[in-house]
Image: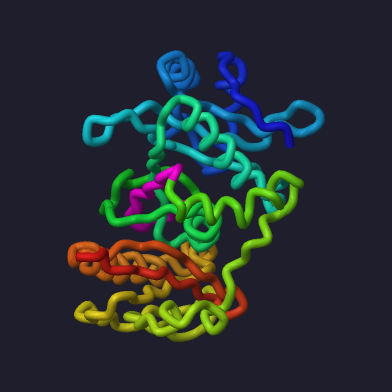
């Protein structure tokens, strides 16, 4: 894939078309207008496209200029890859390129929202990119018309990608070589048993029951005082939204309670591990040093 910055109205329209198709929006109500994209690009926005050999856009990442605590940042509104281009590291490559553009602009923080119950996104964001999360938003986008969101509240993490920290640079060093070769990054989410002892000793606060699409949330323990805790989620949440929406809603409400409780007590999410064969993923939450 050829990844490059785009700036023409025609290519903004291509990105808008991809947004509508990838998120299965039935109309243009929730899609960014091409003119909006174009105007922000003239004042600090960044729109990158991934193009195949025939010149067709197969993925994109878009960020608008933003300000946080008085400093210039980027707010990454959307990252999308067409189904036929997935599994080849295109999404990670788009984020790597976005980071390089931000650094050239003198920006060292990019933020965006992500669904806490989407395991594939969590693996990219935490394991490959090195984000951290300490902010949780309830039903941020309201009732979405997207076919991917179902009828559950659109709760979201606010991801913080601190571009120049050693933590981020270590994660990128472990994956950028494979992504540059057009392959899926080799840094996989290893089973907990082979991770360092401090992580293995983390306390699981919500052990679940069942497998895959039928995974049921366990009663959470909101009073654990360990330095590190684990929060379990299903890895098949998208399928659950379509086939068992009531169960998907139960997962949303229980994990909302967990994350809000622990974030409110000074924890933040710093890593994610997936065991797809067991239908489970686990967030690692660490308490900030005093």
Q: Nearer the viewer, residue 247 or 207?
A: 207
Q: Residue furthest right?
A: 53
Q: Which residues are magenta?
A: 148-164
Query: In this figure, which colouring scheme has been used for the structure?
Result: rainbow
Q: Image height check: is 210 above or below 284? A: below
Quarter location, residue 96 = top right
Which part of the image, by quadrant, shows the N terminus?
Answer: top right
Nearest the viewer among 57 and 239 is 57
Vertical relation: 95 (above or below) 62: below
What percent of the width, then of the height, locates residue 225?
A: 22, 80
Q: Residue at x 26, y 53 (%)?
A: 138
Q: Residue at x 43, y 37 (%)?
A: 76
Along the line of sight, the residue nearer the viewer: 53 or 33: 53
Quadrant showing the C terminus: bottom left
Numbered label tally: 0
Q: Is residue 39 left or right of residue 9?
A: left
User: What residue do we see at 43% from left, 36% from top?
Assistant: 77
64 magenta-colored? no
Give percent across and percent down for residue 6: 59, 21
Rendering coords of residue 86 (x, y %) = 68, 49
Identify which residue is drawn at 51% across, 55% down: 121
Tell me where residue 131 appears, x and y as whole percent: 43, 53
């Amino acid at each position: 894939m050829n990844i490059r910055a785009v700036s023409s109205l025609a290519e903004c329209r291509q990105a808008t078309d991809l947004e509508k198709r990838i998120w299965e929006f039935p109309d243009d109500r929730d899609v960014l207008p091409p003119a909006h994209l174009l105007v922000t690009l003239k004042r600090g926005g960044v729109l990158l496209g991934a193009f195949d050999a025939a010149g067709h856009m197969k993925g994109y990442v878009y960020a608008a200029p933003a300000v946080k605590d008085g400093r210039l940042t980027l707010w990454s509104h959307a990252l999308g890859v067409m189904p036929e281009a997935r599994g080849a590291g295109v999404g990670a490559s788009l984020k790597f390129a976005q980071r390089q553009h931000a650094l050239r602009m003198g920006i060292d923080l990019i933020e965006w929202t992500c669904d806490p119950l989407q395991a594939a996104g969590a693996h990219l964001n935490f394991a490959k990119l090195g984000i951290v999360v300490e902010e949780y938003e309830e039903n941020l986008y309201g009732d979405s018309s997207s076919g991917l969101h179902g009828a559950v509240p659109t709760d979201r993490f606010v991801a913080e990608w601190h571009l120049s920290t050693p933590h981020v640079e270590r994660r990128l060093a472990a994956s950028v070589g494979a992504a540059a070769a057009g392959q899926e990054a080799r840094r996989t989410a290893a089973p907990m048993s082979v991770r360092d002892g401090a992580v293995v000793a983390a306390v699981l606060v919500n052990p679940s029951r069942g497998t895959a699409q039928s995974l049921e949330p366990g009663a959470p323990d909101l009073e654990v005082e360990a330095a590190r805790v684990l929060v379990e989620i299903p890895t098949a949440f998208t399928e659950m939204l379509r086939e068992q929406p009531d169960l998907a809603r139960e997962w949303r409400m229980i994990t909302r309670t967990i994350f809000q409780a622990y974030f409110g007590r000074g924890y933040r999410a710093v890593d994610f591990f997936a065991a797809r064969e067991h239908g489970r993923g686990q967030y690692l939450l660490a308490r900030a040093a005093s």
